[in-house]
């Protein structure tokens, strides 16, 4: 059994327990407090530009389909793992692409909660500079949003740059990434669905 502390509440610390490799979401209710983190295993990207592949592999693994490494996934998609890729196109090939909204570059905490409550992680593109609605986010970085805490205004994120789970405070425009040691701007959310690729 693996236990991971998720969010610090004012009075005490609560734990998320992930048992025996199950992929059931963990839900915590303490009175009016509510937090949820999906049991997604972190994966570190193999190449400098394979964050897209690592995020897709995490979603596939969460759905019990293991792709051994970024190169294998890229080969199945017919692309180079170490080149920036359009996440929606690669997700489409893997049959996990649900939808996105070009006008909503930043998912609201309510939208994040809705997706996580459905048991679906969100692949989120972030960028060093602001991206205008409908603009290109090429050259950005992909992370995976896997949880939320409505009471403390935090989200749970796996950054494939280091493969670690972190709990940044939710902000409207940007997110602090530990591996980059700086704020990155939200560029585009990509909503996932359970797929049966390959």
Image (spheres, grey):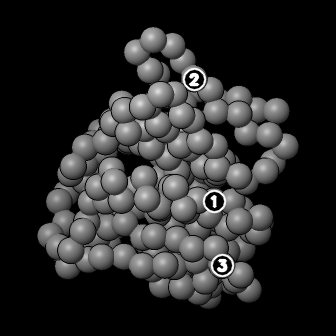
**Count of marks overlaid on the render:** 3
Residue 27: image x %, image y %? 59, 42
Q: From the image, tell me which residue sits under label 2.
A: 14
Quarter assignment of residue 5: top right
> Secondary structure beneath disc 2?
strand
1 over 141 or under it: above or below:
above
Residue most extreme to the front: 31
Quarter assignment of residue 129: bottom left
**Badge 2: residue crowd in 10 Å (few <14, some 14–19, many ≥20):** some
Q: Which comes before the other along the chain, label 1 or label 2? A: 2
116 over 57 or under it: above or below:
above
State if disc 3 and disc 1 touch (CB < 8 Å).
Answer: no
Of circles 1 and 3, the one toward us is 3
Q: From the image, tell me which residue sits under label 1.
A: 58
**Badge 3: residue crowd in 10 Å (few <14, some 14–19, many ≥20):** some
Q: Residue visible at 30% across and 76% down?
A: 101
Residue 115: image x %, image y %? 47, 61
Question: What's the distance in space between the residues labelled 3 and 2, CA to CA?
Answer: 32 Å
Quarter assignment of residue 65: bottom right
> Secondary structure beneath disc 3?
loop
Quadrant where the N terminus is found in the figure: top right
Q: Which comes before the other along the chain, label 3 or label 2? A: 2
Q: Residue visible at 62% across and 81% down?
A: 94
Q: From the image, tell me which residue sits under label 3.
A: 195
> Secondary structure beneath disc 1?
helix
Q: Residue visible at 21% across and 74% down?
A: 103
Q: Nearer the viewer, residue 133 or 110?
A: 110
Residue 9: image x %, image y %? 44, 20
Q: Nearer the viewer, residue 50 or 185?
A: 185
Of circles 1 and 2, the one toward us is 2
């Amino acid at each position: 059994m693996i236990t991971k502390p998720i969010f610090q509440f004012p009075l005490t610390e609560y734990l998320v327990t992930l048992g025996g490799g199950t992929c059931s979401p963990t839900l915590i209710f303490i009175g009016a407090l509510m937090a949820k983190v999906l049991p997604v295993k972190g994966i570190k990207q193999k190449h400098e530009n394979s964050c897209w592949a690592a995020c897709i592999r995490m979603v596939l693994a969460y759905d019990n389909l293991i792709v051994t490494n970024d190169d294998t996934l890229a080969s199945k998609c017919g692309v180079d793992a170490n080149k920036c890729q359009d996440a929606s196109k690669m997700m489409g090939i893997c049959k996990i692409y649900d939808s996105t909204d070009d006008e909503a570059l930043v998912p609201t905490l309510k939208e994040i909660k809705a997706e996580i409550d459905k048991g679906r992680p969100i692949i989120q593109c972030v960028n060093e500079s602001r991206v205008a609605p409908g603009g290109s986010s090429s050259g950005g970085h992909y992370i995976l949003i896997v949880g939320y805490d409505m009471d403390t205004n935090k989200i749970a994120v796996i950054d494939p740059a280091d493969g670690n789970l972190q709990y940044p405070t939710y902000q409207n425009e940007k997110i602090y990434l530990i591996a980059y040691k700086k704020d990155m701007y939200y560029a585009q959310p990509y909503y996932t669905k359970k797929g049966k690729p390959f």
